[in-house]
Amino acid sequence: MKFYLTALLFLSFFLFPSKNVQRKIISDSEFNYTFYVSTEDIAAKKGPRYYYWYKAGEIHSSQGGSAGDLLHGDFTKSYKDNNLAEQGSFKKGLKDNLWKKWYKNGQLYEIASWKSGLRTGQYLQFSEAGQVMISGRFKKDMKHGIWINGTTNDTVFFKKGVEIDKPKRYNRKPLTKRITGFFKELFRKKEKNDPSKKQKADKKGLKAKKQPKNKKSKKQKKVKEQQ
């Protein structure tokens, strides 16, 4: 029963969106924008986070606060020919989860992971020909770990945004393996967040609980045989 109530609440969120969330469609001389805003009053978080907000027909951004309706939900930015330029999602005015950018020719330009307005996780940048130009990771919006330049094949090491010397224990993985590993991690995250797969897993768990155990112990069998 608990599972079905959870499923109904989840579906109602998408079928009957909150009254405090509004859809907006605007455009300027270069791009078209489709996004959602929250009309609720939300306190800004501490730190160097940039908030994105909507006012007077335009999207604005400012560090540490806002002066309009915060962007909240899916965001799509497209060129005038309807090709994608940027796509991601906001949570209470802050960039969250996976964000992608494209060149005008449709080629992927950038993939970045965000968490509460800070770049966190794997980062990839591509050339217009589709080659990997830059590969690395962010930790709370700071470069952290191994960064590789795909053009020069140079490797630089960072710790919390500061460049450091090469660690003593370091075995460099080929760039192709690093990229495939990133996409595997990405798909695993999508599967975890997929509601249909979660429902299937919950149903399997319920069936397993309902099935009675018919196995009898060896001692019980011997007693029956003696009788």
Image: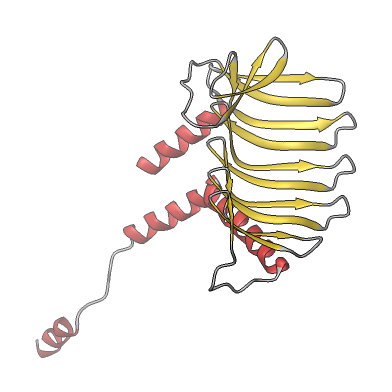
Q: 90 or 199, which lies in front?
A: 90
Residue at 27% x, 72% y: name it. Answer: 214
Query: How many numbered badges does the structure rendering display?
Result: 0
Residue 85 quadrant = top right
User: In the image, what residue occupies the spot 39% across and 43% down?
Assistant: 3
x, y (%) of residue 132? 78, 57
- Up/down of 220 relative to 157, above or below: below
Q: Is residue 112 left or right of residue 127?
A: left
Residue 173, above or below 36: below
Q: Residue at x 74, y 20 (%)?
A: 25
Structure colour scheme: secondary structure
Q: Is residue 71 above or below residue 129?
A: above
Coordinates of residue 88 in the picture (x, y in percent): 66, 37
**Residue 130: quadrant of the picture:** bottom right
**Res. 148 in view:** yes
Q: Where is residue 227 shown, x and y percent of the image?
A: 9, 86
Q: Residue furthest bottom?
A: 226
Residue 157 in the image: state x and y as whole percent: 61, 60
- In terms of depth relative to the viewer, which is nearer, 183 or 123? 123
Using the rendered view, name the quadrant where residue 55 is placed. Answer: top right
Q: Residue furthest top?
A: 56
Where does the N terminus fall, quadrant-wise? top left
**Res. 1 in view:** no
